[in-house]
């Protein structure tokens, strides 16, 4: 029998908002385009233009100045690409309303 003390698997994680926000400022179902923005304290740091028709992404700005408060540039671009595809393929022009309805608010 092993007498070594077992490590506890009990604990908790506290999640606290950094204040960095990301959202879609525009979704055009007909043109299959979306614009995502990353903001902090009302300043836009990065804008991501997703065009599903041409399968292209254009990025203006960067999140480097936000340091550890935000995800890296690639993560935001990837997230906006995947979310834009989901929203457009499901004819969703108002993501906030869609997710609020989904969770029952």
Image (cartoon, rainbow, N blue to C red):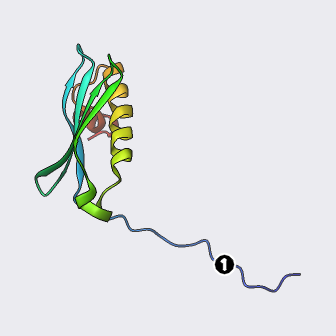
Residue 35 rendering spot, x and y as whole percentages = 21, 32
Residue 101 rendering spot, x and y as whole percentages = 28, 34
**Image point (29%, 63%), residue name:** 67
Picture quarter containing residue 40? Answer: bottom left
Q: Is residue 13 above or below residue 23?
A: below
Task: Report the residue that reaches farthest toward the top.
Answer: 30
Picture quarter containing residue 37? Answer: top left
Residue density around tag 1, few if under 14, some if 14–19, many if 20 or more, within 10 Å: few
Q: Is residue 95 left or right of residue 41?
A: right
Q: Is residue 78 visible?
A: yes
Q: Nearer the viewer, residue 17 or 37?
A: 37
**Image point (35%, 33%), residue name:** 81
Residue of label 1: 7
Task: Report the residue that reaches farthest toward the right.
Answer: 1
Which image quarter holds the N terminus? bottom right
Residue 2 rendering spot, x and y as whole percentages = 85, 82
Task: Report the residue that reaches farthest toward the left.
Answer: 42
Q: Is residue 101 above or below residue 56?
A: below
**Image point (33%, 48%), residue name:** 73
């Amino acid at each position: 029998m092993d007498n070594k003390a077992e490590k506890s698997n009990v604990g908790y994680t506290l999640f606290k908002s950094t204040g960095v926000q990301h959202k879609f400022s525009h979704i055009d179902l007909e043109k299959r385009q979306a614009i995502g923005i990353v903001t902090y304290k009302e300043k836009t740091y990065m804008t991501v233009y997703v065009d599903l028709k041409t399968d292209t992404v254009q990025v203006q700005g960067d999140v480097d100045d936000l340091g550890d408060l935000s995800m890296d540039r690639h993560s935001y671009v990837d997230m906006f690409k995947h979310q834009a595809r989901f929203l457009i393929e499901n004819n969703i022009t108002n993501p906030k309303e869609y997710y609020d309805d989904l969770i029952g608010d």
